Structure formats: structure tokens, C-alpha cells
Image (spheres, helix red, strand yellow):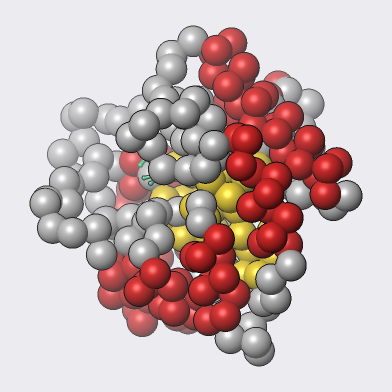
Amino acid sequence: MQDVFDSDSSSHGSLVSRYQGLLQRLRTAEKRFDRPNNSVCLVAVSKTYPARDIRAVAQEGQQDFGENQVRDALAKFPELGDLNRTWHFIGPIQSNKCRDIAQNFDWIHSVERLKIARRLSELRPAEMEPLNILLQVNLQNEVTKAGISPDAVSELAATVLELPNIRLRGLMAIPAPENDFDRQRSIFSRLRELQERTSQQLGISLDCLSMGMTDDLEAAVAEGTTHVRIGTAIFGPRQKRGTEDPD
Ligand SMILES: *Cc1c(COP(=O)(O)O)cnc(C)c1O
């Protein structure tokens, strides 16, 4: 939860205590839903926050960070190279950004087009580990939301599997806001079932599910998430980015 009384949201002490609080919340959820301790990866979504905040959280032991704008992320990376952290790209992907993404990130959660998957595969340097890919699914067929229809997952997954230099790991979704815990669970269970069905159909084992944010983390843990994506609950309220183009 955001602390409205904390005017200096990037002050070191409150950042660290928010981070530790969130970690504790995640570990508590694992315990409550019989998930092994430490089995859910926390992706700390550091978009819009400065490199010094990322460094402070990294110093607490955080390994995985998420960014959703290429330009923003690339501006910070030179200051953070010594940290050797794992970078997740979670935003919309434009073709002309595929090279930067393929060269600088370890995971991409937001693939929704074959053309983009092909480019990422082509542009991933062969000497690097394969890029880990998740397909973003529009679970509720919301017109304004990114992601492919659940019906299209199997076909896209089958083609993506054939590409070199990338490794298909699973599915990602951002459901519409929903306060009721049981309804949150039931939506997440659809992504899990889709994942299981796709794995069966293709005879492979997709092992990752990227689902769960600040307000539905527990429901996601209950339904088998492997990656939760949390920003403001760790780093504090975000400044609006303004109206410039996303990239
Ligand atoms: C920004 C973002 C998050 C984190 O949202 P917060 O409200 O900052 O916790 C998670 N997933 C995606 C895809 C995002 O773009």
C-alpha cells in the first residue's frame, strides 16, 4: 500500500522498508498457499524510477527488475552494469526497438506478434543465452488491452517454439482491476489452465506464469504464478510520464 504521508518517496529508509515489507508479503503468501518458500520471483518494476533507487533495492538482494520503455531503461543501464541483475521487458514492443531489447534484456513478458518474436530471435546475439519469452494474453478480450486472444495462443506458441535464440517459457496477463479475491483467482486460473492445455497440445513444458501485481498478488500466488510484477508498492508513487510517445 502507498504511504500517503511519505512525501519523500525515494528516501532510502522508506524505500528499503517498503521493499522488505513487500518481500515479506510475498513469502507469507507462498506459505499460505503451499508454494515452496522463495519459489515466486519478484520482478521489481523500476520503470520511471532513477538508477539510485534500483541500486538501493539491489543492495537489499533484489535480483530481477522490470522496465516497460526501452529508452528509459537504456538511459539507466550504463550506471547499473556492475550489478549484474536480470532485466525483464514488460511493455509494448515496437519493431524498431527489437534490437535494443534483444541485446539488453533477459526476459520479455509482452510478446504478442509472430513478427516481433521473429525479430527478437534474429537480433538476439548468438553468443548470449537465449532470450526468455512469455506470450501476453488478453484473458478477458478487453478491446483496449494488449495481448493475444486465448484461442490464438496455441498456434503462436507452436511457431515461436521453432525460432532459434529465444526460449518460450510461458504466458503473461494483466487482468482488469478486480477487488474480489475469488474472482481474481478465477481469472488467474484461466491463464494457468491455458498454460497447461498449451503445454499438453505442444508436448512441451511451459514453466512460467507472469501474473499478479500489488492488488492481486495473493490470488496469483494461489493460482501458481511464477513471476509477480510490482512497482509502486516497492518504489513509491510514480510521477506521471507526461504525454510523450512511449518510445
Ligand atoms: C507498471 C507495470 C507493473 C507494476 O505496476 P505498479 O502499479 O507500479 O505496481 C506491472 N506490470 C506491468 C506490465 C506494468 O507495466
Image quadrant of residue 2?
A: top left
Identify the residue at horizontal 56%, vertical 65% (top origin).
Answer: 117
- Between 4 and 150, which is closer to the camera in this rendering? 150
**For residue 148, above or below residue 70:** above
- Between 193 and 17, which is closer to the camera in this rendering? 193
* Residue 30 x, y percent position in the rendering: 69, 31
* Residue 17 x, y percent position in the rendering: 41, 42
Count of numbered labels shown in the rendering? 0
* Residue 233 x, y percent position in the rendering: 38, 37
- Between 23 and 194, which is closer to the camera in this rendering? 194
> Is residue 176 in sight in this rendering?
yes
* Residue 135 x, y percent position in the rendering: 58, 50
The quadrant the C terminus occupies is bottom left
Residue 179 falls left or right of residue 189: left
**For residue 135, above or below residue 82:** above
**For residue 219, above or below residue 97:** above
Quadrant of picture, ligand 1 = top left
Residue 230 falls left or right of residue 136: left
**For residue 191, above or below residue 199:** above
Identify the residue at horizontal 61%, vertical 19% (top origin).
Answer: 185
Image quadrant of residue 223?
A: top right
> Is residue 37 in sight in this rendering?
no
Q: Kindly give the residue lying farthest to the left in the view shown.
A: 243
Identify the residue at horizontal 65%, vertical 26% (top origin).
Answer: 190
